[in-house]
């Protein structure tokens, strides 16, 4: 059965819309929930909410900085879930977290907390495919879709298994290494997405390094859309203060570019 995130992304894609999924670190600022609503209103099709972790292995310096700021403010998974229970974002929410936090809470309890907070999908990038069966089943029982990642070096046989088990969308990583802003879109991103698209009708989004509207348009020529994280977080971490209006303006530029094609 198709879940809330995948259903929403499929509907948007089938209308001819290129998908835009911004990322915000939960608890980054006092007004982070207002920022979340602002980027939803600015044209996000879904939003990825990062749950800050002290050892984020796949995150580059900007996401790490955002996590450090959020943790220093006393942010916890429970505080993020509590904040989200009090807001209707208007678009599907996917949590991005690490398996340490899942294990610490227990898979069933953590999945229940996600669901109670209004989150409908989870990205847990550090759990190997061979060890994620339990989490996927527990999450699915709570209505949580598990989004899986594919990399440029993923062989075809493994790629097929990932695509089959990924729900919500298939996250196509544009490059090897960590997240972070880039001055150009690496060729491996569209090439990987093309391989995935040949295997599935599920939505396929490119992430890791999508930094400008132009890069988003380039990536979406092959994929169904993009995930934008570090570039948006850099706006929010700016010393001048990037609040809801700045975040909305950033997302609006990407939305306009994607709509124009």
Image: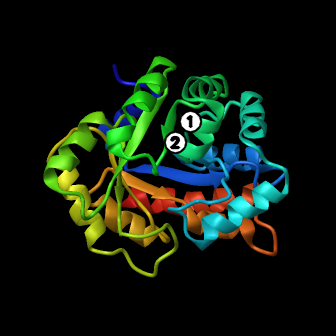
Above/below status of 139 relative to 219: above
Q: Quadrant of residue 188?
A: bottom left
Residue at left offset 36%, top offset 31%:
133
Residue at left offset 71%, top offset 40%:
77
Residue 135: percent from left, percent from top: 45, 31
Above/below status of 198 relative to 142: below
Which residue is farthest bottom?
Answer: 183
Could you tell me if the residues under marks 1 and 2 are in contact, i.e. CB atoms within 8 Å? yes
Residue at left offset 69%, top offset 59%:
67
Instruction: Check disc 1 and report the residue beneath it.
Output: 91
Q: Earlier in the sequence, mark 1 or mark 2?
A: 2
Q: Is residue 85 left or right of residue 7?
A: right
Q: Is residue 223 left or right of residue 53?
A: left
Instruction: Check disc 2 and report the residue beneath it.
Output: 46
Of residue 250 and residue 70, the one placed in the foreground of this image is: 70
Of residue 55 and residue 251, the one placed in the foreground of this image is: 55
Check disc 1 and report its element: helix, strand or loop: loop
Residue 96 visible in image:
no
How many angstroms separate mark 1 from mark 2 (CA)?
5 Å
Q: Quadrant of residue 28?
A: bottom right
Above/below status of 71 relative to 10: below
């Amino acid at each position: 059965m198709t879940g809330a995130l995948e259903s929403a992304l499929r509907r948007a894609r089938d209308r001819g819309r290129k998908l835009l999924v911004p990322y915000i670190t939960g608890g980054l600022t006092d007004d982070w929930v207002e920022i979340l609503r602002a980027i939803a209103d600015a044209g996000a099709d879904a939003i990825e909410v990062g749950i800050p972790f002290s050892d984020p292995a796949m995150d580059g310096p900007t996401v790490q900085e955002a996590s450090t700021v959020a943790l220093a403010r006393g942010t916890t998974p429970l505080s993020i879930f509590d904040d989200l229970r009090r807001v209707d974002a208007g678009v599907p929410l996917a949590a991005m977290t690490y398996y340490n936090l899942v294990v610490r809470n227990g898979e069933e309890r953590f999945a229940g907390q996600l669901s109670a907070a209004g989150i409908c999908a989870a990205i847990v990038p550090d759990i190997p495919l061979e060890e994620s069966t339990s989490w996927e089943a527990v999450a699915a029982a709570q209505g949580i879709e598990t989004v899986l990642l594919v990399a440029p070096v993923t062989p075809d046989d493994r790629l097929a298994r990932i695509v089959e088990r990924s729900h919500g969308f298939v996250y196509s990583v544009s490059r090897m290494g960590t997240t972070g802003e880039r001055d150009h879109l690496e060729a491996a991103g569209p090439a990987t997405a093309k391989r995935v698209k040949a295997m599935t009708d599920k939505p396929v989004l490119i992430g890791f390094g999508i930094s400008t509207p132009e890069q988003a348009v380039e990536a979406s020529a092959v994929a169904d859309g993009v995930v934008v994280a570090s570039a948006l977080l850099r706006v929010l971490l700016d010393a001048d203060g990037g609040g809801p209006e700045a975040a909305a303006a950033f997302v609006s530029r990407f939305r306009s570019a994607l709509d124009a094609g």
